Image (cartoon, helix red, strand yellow):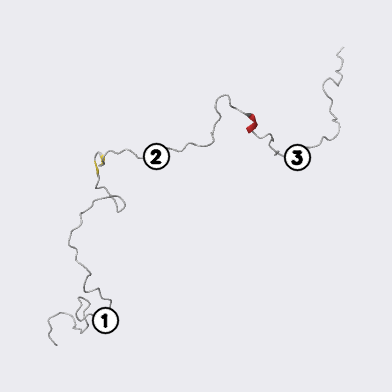
Amino acid sequence: MVKQRSPGPRYALPTMFGNVKHDPTRPQAPAFSFGVVTQRRAKISSPGPKYDTRDINQHGKLRIPQAPVLGRWRATKIPRTPAPKQYSTKLIDHQYPSYSFGFKRQPSGKSKTPGPNEYAAPSCM
């Protein structure tokens, strides 16, 4: 029996750690980076990447009071509603609605039922 320093069998496989004598059949991570980060980024404790809570405290957003700088609204050329005593019915179309709920039925001749007062009441005496 051969004595070795490790309890298991000894293999001559190339290593998968590091960059020296790496196994060519396995993927290898890059051995260098393109730059060094010189400043540490401030840790932002926000609910997510979309929200920036650095300017918010318990009273609301930290902002200087501002007034909106907007132009005036353009006046409309045509008034949308008539003024008092200027109501005109000429603006309304004189055509009535041209739809119905069905076709008209022609009467089928004279009715066979008697009308009111067309019958003689039997005499009781």
Residue 49: x, y in percent?
30, 54
- Which of pointers 2 and 1 indicates the residue nearer the eye? 2
Q: How many numbered badges does the structure rendering display? A: 3
- Tell which circle, 1 or 3, labels the residue nearer the N-terminal end: 1
Disc 1 packing (10 Å; few <14; some 14–19; many ≥20): few
Q: Position of residue 37 (x, y in %)?
A: 19, 63
Give the left or right position of residue 8, taking residue 75 as reference.
left
The amino acid pointed to by label 3 is: Phe
**Amino acid carrying mark 2 in the image:** Gly
Residue tagged by mark 3?
Answer: 103
Cβ atoms at labels 1 and 3 below 8 Å apart: no
Sequence-wise first label, 2 or 1: 1
Instruction: Read off the residue under disc 1.
Output: 24
Residue lying furthest bottom: 1
Q: CA distance from mark 2 to mark 1?
A: 69 Å
Q: Kindly identify the residue that appears in the image at 62 percent across and 28 percent down.
A: 88
Q: For mark 2, what is the residue? A: 71
| Left or right of residue 112: residue 74 | left
The relative height of residue 18 versus residue 65 in the rendered view (above or below) is below
Question: Is 11 or 56 nearer to us in this picture?
Answer: 56
Seen in the picture, residue 75 relative to 13 is either above or below; the reply is above
